[in-house]
Image (spheres, helix red, strand yellow):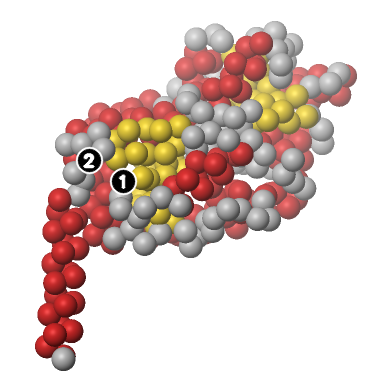
Amino acid sequence: MIRFVGRSIALMLFAALCYAQEYPSRAIRMVMPFAPGGPTDIVARIVSERLSARIGQPAVIENRAGANGIIGTEHVAKSAPDGYTLLVAPTSHAINPSIYKKLPYDTLKDFASVVYLGASTCMVMVVGNAVPAKTPQDFVALSRSRNTAYAAAGVGNFTHLAGEYFNMMAGTSVLAVQYKGAGPMVTALYGGEVQAAFLGPVQGINLVKDGRLRALAVTGQKRLAQMPNVPTMAESGYPSYDLDGGIQAAVYAPAKTPREIILKLNREINAVLDEPVVKERFVSLALEGAGGAPEELDRQLTSKMKKYASIVKAAKIEPE
């Protein structure tokens, strides 16, 4: 009996090893739970392109937007744990548990961490070119003289937290208008539907350099090398405002995905992040690459969840 059990366990381990060696044998879907064009979407496409080349199978980005990322995230949580459906989660993944009392998944229990891709060093406060404000204080004065609004990519999204954090620091009540992603947010700025937004530098740098939007300040501790003339919030009169870009992008698999597959994905994506062309692209977009073991993403997620919960509570953000 003992010999039979030992043989069965050995066969199971051998089968798992063979499965991991054969994986992947078809295309991998990388679900991005927001509309195309946002900072996490850009990061996901950089990584997926190089990952496809490494594994010899397509790593395809699939945008499933809606409900502040909940729709796409739920889809992955309920997908087969076979490594062929992954979640590329933005910062909202760490924020939603403090916003929504009942999520259709458990953020910690229904996912297996794969790898932390990286984060923005800050957010960029931008306004449309028709808005007569050149500094955050100009914008505060404007908001006190007339109704103003800022764009956010969903209730509790990091773009929303950044805006509400600004309201707290500046003593304003600028209205948040929700959109399904950073792409639609920018379109709203162009059309004058809203006056301001907090964008990740992935988007903000290019849009400001092209003259399509105006940057008022960055939210981190230091200026961006790509926009050296744009001051920090501290330099603009709001020393207490210090907010990095959070977990800009991270990869998760459904819970119970075989550990061998998690580790294989982790190795391959870490190798992608270590490629000079990817590093250069990240630097050009003011992104800090991360990588590391799955356990590092576990630590990042739990840490950020606590931090964002405190901001949500202080700002009294509630789902609509």
Relative horizontal placement of residue 128, taking residue 269 as reference (left or right): right
Q: 10 Å neighbourhood of mark 1: few (<14), some, or many (≥20)?
A: many
Relative horizontal placement of residue 95, taking residue 249 as reference (left or right): right
Q: Give the mark nearest the N terminus, 1 or 2.
A: 2
Q: Which residue is mark 2?
A: 26
When asked about the image quadrant of residue 130, the answer is top right
Label at residue 100: none
Q: Which residue is mark 1?
A: 84
Percent coordinates x, y for residue 199 in the rendering: 57, 28
- Name above or below for residue 126 compared with residue 47: above
Relative horizontal placement of residue 126, taking residue 285 as reference (left or right): right
Percent coordinates x, y for residue 38 in the rendering: 50, 28
Residue at 19% in and 56% down: 20
Image quadrant holding the C terminus, namely top right
Percent coordinates x, y for residue 86 in the rendering: 37, 45
Image quadrant holding the N terminus, namely bottom left
Q: CB under 8 Å between callouts 1 and 2?
A: yes
Q: Secondary structure at mark 2?
A: loop
Q: Is residue 192 visible?
A: yes
State the residue lying farthest toward the bottom: 1
Q: How far separated are the C-alphas under marks 1 and 2? A: 8 Å
